[in-house]
Amino acid sequence: MTGALRVVEHHLMVYRRTWKGGMFVSFASPILFLAAIGIGLGSLIARGPVHTVGGVSYLTFLAPGLLAATAMQTAFVETTYPVMAKIQWLRTYDGMLATPLTVRDVLGGEIGWLVIRLATTAFAFFLVMVLFGTVHSLVALLMIPVVVLNGLAFGAPIFAFTATQRKDKGFPTIGRFIITPLFLLGGVFFPIAQLPPIAQGIAWATPLAHSVVLSRSLAIGGMNPSALIDVAVLAAYATLGIIAASITLPRRLVR
C-alpha cells in the first residue's frame, strides 16, 4: 500500500503543473454540452407533442448520461497513451522498478490515480449539473461513486490491453469501434429502448448503459429497481479488468 501511494504521489507531482488546464476542460466541456444540446436541442423537444423524455426535461435526462460517458472517455484517455508512454517511450515504470517498488505497487498506484482523476472530473461535472438545475435530490451525490466505478469498468480492461501493446495502433480502434459508438448509442442521448433489439442487447452488455440508467435515476431522486444488477455489472468489469492487468503488466515489465 505504501508503494502504491508513492506512485500516486508521482502523479500528483506531475499533475500540479497541468491541473489548471485539466480542470478548465472538466468544467468547460459539460457547460458547452449541456448548453448546446441540453438547452438548445431540449428547447426543440419541449415544443414537440411529448415535451419530455422519460418524464423529465431533456436537459435533466441528458446530464447524468453525459456524466457517465465523460467517465468512460476519461478512463480511455488515461489508460492508453499515458500508460504506453510510461511502459515503452519514457520507461517511467522501469525507473520505478529500479527502486524498492514492485509491479503490484505500480498497478495499485495507477488504479488509485485513475480513481482520483475520475472522481475530480465527476465532481466538476456534478457542480455544473447543479448550476444547470439538473440535480433534484441529495441522493444524486451517489452518482459520483457510480461513474467512478463506471470509469474503472472501462479503464482497468483497457489498461490490461495497453500493457500488451508494442505500438499504439490499437487505441484508435478502441476509440472508433467501442468508445464512440457507446457514447452515441449507450443511452446518453435517448432511451436504449428506442434501439433495435440487437443493439439493445449489445448496449446492455456494456458498463455504460448500466451507469447511465443508474445515474439518471439518482439524479431525479429515485432508485432504479435494477440498481444492484447495475452495480454488480460495473463491479464485475472493473474487477476482471484489474485481475487481467495484474497478469499483463508483470509479463510486460518483468524480464
Image (tube, rainbow, N blue to C red):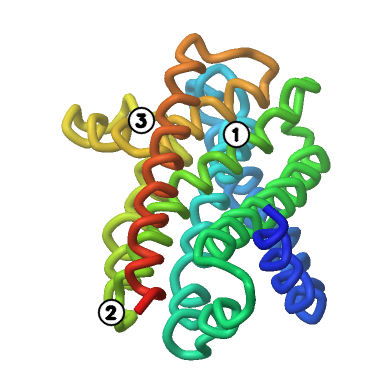
The amino acid type of the residue labelled 1 equals Val
- Ranked by sequence position, the earlier of labels 2 and 3 is 2
Structural distance between the alpha carbons of marks 2 and 3:
31 Å
Q: Residue furthest front?
A: 100
Gap in angstroms between the C-alphas marked 2 and 1: 31 Å
Dot 2 surroundings within 10 Å: few (below 14), some, or many (20 or more)?
few
Q: Is residue 11 above or below residue 229?
A: below
- Which numbered tag is attached to residue 169? 2
Q: Quadrant of residue 57?
A: top right
Badge 1: few (under 14), some or many (20 or more) residues near its Cα, within 10 Å? many
Q: Position of residue 97 (x, y in %)?
A: 55, 77
- What residue is rendered at 30% in x and 70% in y? 164
Q: Is residue 69 above or below residue 224?
A: below
Crowding at label 3, few (<14), some or many (≥20) Cα neighbours within 10 Å?
some
| Badge number at residue 192 | 3
Q: CA distance from mark 1 to mark 3?
A: 19 Å
